[in-house]
Amino acid sequence: MKLSDKLQSWIKSNPAPWKIGQLQITPSSGKEGFFDLFHEEDQGRSDLKISEDYEDARKWVKLSETDEYRPLKGEKNLKRGWKLVRIPFNTLKEILDIFYPTAVANYFYQQDKNLRITPPRDTFERQSGMYHVVKKATDSQIQTVENTLCQKRCLKMRLWEGSQYQDVPSVIPLLCPEVCNLFIAGVRLEIKGNVEPKLEE
Amino acid sequence: MSLKHAALILAGHGSTLNADSSEPTYLHADGIRKRGIFAEVHECFWKEEPHYRDVLRQVDAKVAYIVPLFISRGYFTEKVLPREFEVTPGRSILNGKEICYCEPVGAHPGMTQVLLHRAQTVLGSADVDLSQTCLFIAGHGTNLNENSTVIIYEQVKKISEMGIYGECRPFFMEQKPLIKEWMAQTKMPNVIVVPFFISDGLHSYEDIPVMLGISENVKATGFKNPTEVNGRRVWYAHAIGTEPQIEDVILAQIDLFHETFGQTTVLD
């Protein structure tokens, strides 16, 4: 079954509104099979910038409310003040992939018990070049990055450290099956004494 | 052959520091998406999400072509991407999907036409005697980018042999011939510079114009085309990776993949 078919079936069997990360999804009023998307904290606001063009989502995920760059899409600083309206189902998954890349896929892979979970040490072991050094990371250095990056900034549930999630109706969880490149870069900086790398290899 | 059943995965580098670094990847993915050639088009990155490691989970199609949006073969295209995607050059079967790992964009012979087009575009309608013009192709030029240096020299040779410009020369930020010494490298009164970089990042957009002497601070004052420097006119183009014709090179890399490894085998 295609991911978009799985998403459609999930929407049918879970009552609106639906939620993923900081996004809330509701059926468009008077237009069956179409959806509105907005920041969950913007519910009820009447001064939102309205768009039907899903490509606007790219601009909104790029910078935070304070115009800081958001390379970590799971970060709890999604821009507010906008509303995507009358989005047809055939572009809904594409839009969710823009806001939260691979989140929909991860969820259905996990439902099918096909989501591979990789322990951090395994991820570190395959690194090379300037990240080769993370193989030497201590538990304490890993914990520091988990505290400062994952716990403080990211909404994703860390399956790689053994977190178990409870399925909540109408919520697509943000699952993290493996530490990301930002995590690896953070561990490298911990080992190197927090000296910024010159090159972004 | 039809690619209607297949997915295109465009693999860029991305950045955790520069919000514009991934723009060319999105630009070309969108351009190809609008052509309706593939069932799906996905972007992915080393430093941004979705990561190389994860993107294949988003793919429904049974066949996926990975095209690296990199300027040359090297550490990333030969080591990092195959490792993270868990593929080998040519075809790999992963979870019942056929994954076709193509050569990087910058290594395709079609880049010569893209360079010439970009050079012509930056000149616009200016009245310029091309026989009195030097086309410089700019690269980074360190050991890390050894292969991109080789590609630049190859492109310079090809373009020189075409005889369109009075001269075609390479120069680099961090190795000789140096960009900042360009005035000693050509006597031509007109100079066009095309940066052989993927994105208009720190190097190509901010550093090189200063080295050329066409701006003291690009962020503060920008630069105009042409700028007169010591009686010579200098035109500076955007990074080659931002050229819309790169879309055709991406598709050409898939054609080249078929020529090298044959047609798709899983579905046909």
Image (cartoon, grey):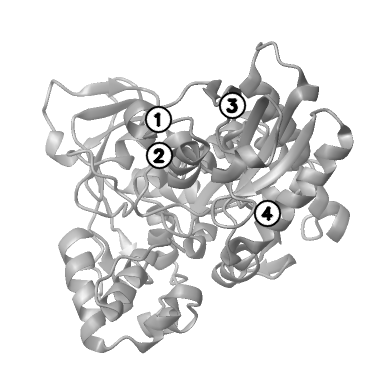
Q: Chain of mark 2?
A: A
C-alpha span from label 1 to label 4:
29 Å
Which residue is tagged 4? B104
Say which element carries label 2: helix
Q: Residue at x 14, y 34 (%)?
A: A42
Q: Could you say which quadrant of the image residue B158 lies in? A: top right
Measured Cα–Cα span from mark 1 to mark 2: 7 Å
- Quick check: B225 above or below B150? above
The location of residue B257, given as percent across then percent down, is: 79, 54
Res. B258 visible in picture:
yes
Q: Mark 3 against mark 2, which lies toward the viewer?
A: 3
Q: Alpha carbon of mark 4 to alpha carbon of mark 2: how far?
A: 28 Å
The part of the image, by quadrant, that contains residue A197 is: bottom left
- Provide the residue designation for mark 3: B234
C-alpha distance separating marks 3 and 1: 40 Å
Residue carrying label 1: A54
Q: Amino acid at mark 3?
A: Val
Do labels 3 and 2 touch, CB within 8 Å?
A: no
- Residue type, mark 1 in image: Tyr
Task: Pinpoint residue A120: horizontal percent, then vertical percent.
Answer: 36, 80
Which residue type does callout 4 highlight?
A: Pro
Name the residue: 77% across, 55% down: B267
Q: Residue at x 68, y 48 (%)?
A: B105
The kind of secondary structure element at disc 3 is strand
